[in-house]
Image: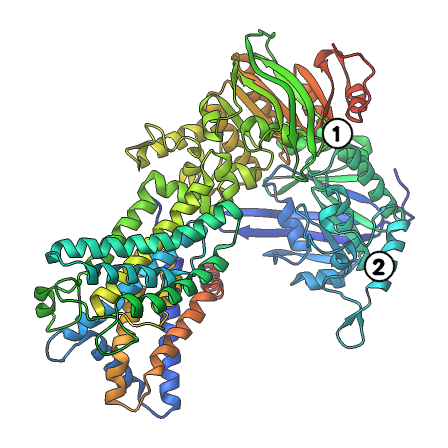
Amino acid sequence: MKKLNFNTLIVSLLATLFGLIAGALLMLAIGSNPIEGYGYLLQGGLGIGLKGISRLGDTLAVSTPLILTGLSVAFAFRTGLFNIGAAGQMLFGGFCAVAVGLSFNFPQPIMIVMVVGAGILGGAVWGIIPGLLKAVFNVHEVVSTIMMNWIAYWVVYYAIPTFFKGEFLETESRQIPALSGLRIGALSDLFGGSVINLGLFFAIVSVILIAFILNRTVLGFELKAVGFNRHSAEYAGINVNRNIILSMMIAGGLAGLAGAAQYMGNATSMQIGIMPTQGFDGIAVALIGANTPIGAFLAALFFGILYTGKGFMNANTSIPPEIADTIIATIIYFAATSILIERAINWFKKKGKRGAKNE
Amino acid sequence: MIIRGDILEYVVEMLNITKDFPGIRANDDITLKLQKGEIHALLGENGAGKSTLMSVLFGLYQPDKGSISIKGKRVNISNPNIANDLKIGMVHQHFKLVHNFTVTENIVLGKEPKMGIGGMNLKAASKKIKELSDKYNLNVEPDSQIQDISVGMQQRVEILKMLYRDAEILIFDEPTAVLTPQEIIELIKIMKDLVKEGKSIILITHKLKEIKAAADRCTVLRRGKVIGMVEVKETTEEKMAEMMVGRVVDFVVDKQPQKLGEVILEIEHLNVLNNKKVLGLKDFSISLRAGEILGVAGVEGNGQTELVEAITGMRNITSGSILLKGNDLKHRSIRKRIEAGIAHIPEDRQRRGLVLDYSLENNLVLEVYYRKPYSKHGLLNQKEINDHANKVIKQFDVRAGEGAYSKARSLSGGNQQKAIVGREIDLNPELLIAVQPTRGLDVGSIEYIHKRIVEQRDSGKAVLLVSLELDEILNVSDRIAVINNGELVGIVDANDTDENEVGLMMTGINRRVTV
């Protein structure tokens, strides 16, 4: 196997570090103590020194959909496609999962399989459509996936109040019965009543599976070949269109699974009129994770810590929770301009070598 | 000798230039002196250090040692803008043009003639370009779009770009690699006109014939070092080739007596549309037997691409038939055709032939990765893939820094091409389609690839050789099919024809009656 690309790893770590430094400067600028701020942020995200480990469980739960949307974007990107539609795929997959969860009443193991299956299937359908449009009519996937996002948004907007109206509110579905969702008692108890659920398990399996597909299988070989160079893939006899459709289908399925984890695991009902932010955060997760499955996994965990910890930080200091979002934005900025960091690294390396020669 | 005045005036003096890259010394104590009003050829194989040296002159790299003087003045060219200010211009091998811009817009790009607030005076620019074009007989139409003009014309736009910026020292980087024989002759004429008007030219090339035709003096590089500087008039192509490669070079391809076998490829009344949706190949019929090399000669864009893509399955046919060993290929996919025994060395190695970001080992299984032993039950077998790569690398002498793990992108053009040739011949095909197999390669690699192609023929396989290089067609082929405007002009025996006849046929005139 190839050796790991250390530059990408260093770039991602440096981008994160710069983001944290920028956050610290902002905290200083509003007259707060950054060490204190980050202390509370970490404490809130990881639950260190707090009673029970429910916060750690919540962090993992918050990370779960991010792992999957990040994986979805990263996977599509590796195959030469820019999946901006993770939000819509997640929403529609989540909707299908909720619909199944509210319509059937089987024992929980069967329900879990059905709910997860529905989520993956719904997302896959939402991914296949842009894939087909690209393969057959050469419609760019950025355009079609954004449109699919809004189609999902309005489908949910219409379907939830019409078919699954909640008891008190027009804007959300009925409560999901405990035995239909992805939460299981033992896991929640273990994490002290956290919202952590089986979605995390499916996310980890997905990370391993996608890494395996990309690196070890004939399918991965074809998908990456098409992603790197369509023309040579075609020349070599690879069915380019089939691979584009397949890739969008898998990417959609991953995002759909994120939807199942979010709406059937983290939440207890589905609200309308909300485009899930995890879809777009997935792009950032993939970017910081250098489009590798394991990278996306780690980046999503980091995001989870920031998102869960920011409230705790705000409660204990005067630092506004938006600082966490600023840190993420800064990290994205540095990751997106990673070429500059890479150049700087090369420059330092060169300088180091010259210095060594002169000695 | 050309008389250049009493005192020889050097416009460029690169003295003792040394440039190191990690693990390799690209330029080792190189001295190059360009006289005013001369065409100075820089000859060397791929990787000899020509491009590095020119990049140093153009300010893209800083030399580790050595100095540069322009018109006797010591200069420090730390970036290309300074090179521009010093009136150094470069025509790159791969043109840097915006395809949906007009000629004028491309030329003024970065030096737009401003008018008022945010306005642009394109008319004046257009007029100046027209004048320049007329002065040097370039025949460029300032208002046409780049995507509508030929490659040869695009190159002239690049030349005009330099002239528009008043460049005095012109660097041509492998300018003939993309040109047809006619365009090459015209380009040489243009270069001679340019030096007559007082410009000085550095011509980077490895084509000896063109040096002989165009250059006054020639500096030969090998492995980063200057081997010598010769007056072109006083030397021969063989001598220069020997200096470049470091040994005596065989220009004649050795072939065993022909043993013809069964008919492998039979094309009848083939009609194929081109990208503009008009017939690019018209009523085309040829047949090719085992044990022969059929050369397809023609000027670029006369139906060769359509022919090859129709046979390999990358383009649909309108009517007619293509038979491989008697089997109709019409409804077979590209993959099925490869499996049926067609191998294809594509025209564009970087666009079609290789996945540049894949490792060499992955590229070498690009067509067979899904078969045993390279994979089983959908899982890749890395060890088999690696073993296969090492075998091909060894057999075909592919040189790569990290061996099988090297990214294809990191290989030199010659080694990329050897990898493709190796991969295709390793398929052990019934029919090998070689399109421009030696495009842009150095003498050593050309010799090697020709040898391997002829080996295919000698071992009883069929080879279809499509090339724009007339010498290649004449040297390697057994029979030559000449194509013009999508039609077959005629087929001649390679032993029974010459450059003149084939060249004339390429323009559509056939003096013989084809049977």
**Count of marks overlaid on the render:** 2
Residue A106 locus on image (x, y percent): 12, 56
Q: How is the image coloured?
A: rainbow
Residue B56 locus on image (x, y percent): 65, 54
Residue placed at 22% from the left, 58% from the top? A100
Q: In this view, does B265 lie to the left or right of B485?
A: left
- The quarter of the rendered structure image containing the N terminus of chain B is top right
Q: How far apart are marks 1 and 2 (CA)?
A: 32 Å
Asked if residue B511 shows in the view, the reply is yes
Q: Is residue B113 left or right of residue B250?
A: right
Residues beneath discs 1 and 2 located on the same chain: yes
- The chain letter for the residue carrying disc 1 is B
Q: Is mark 2 on a helix, strand or loop?
A: helix
Tell which circle, 1 or 2, labels the residue nearer the N-terminal end: 2
What is the quadrant of residue A282 in the picture? bottom left
- Residue type beneath disc 1: Asn
Residue A52 locus on image (x, y percent): 10, 76
- The chain letter for the residue carrying disc 2 is B
- The quarter of the rendered structure image containing the C terminus of chain B is top right
Q: Is residue B75 left or right of residue B24?
A: right
Q: Count neighbours of disc 2 (C-alpha within 10 A) and say few if under 14, some if 14 to 19, many if 20 or more.
A: some
Residue placed at 44% from the left, 35% from the top? B366
Residue placed at 45% from the left, 44% from the top? A226
Q: Which disc is residue B485 wearing?
A: 1
- Label 2 sits on residue: B126
Q: Is mark 1 on a helix, strand or loop?
A: loop
Closer to us: A196 or A272: A272
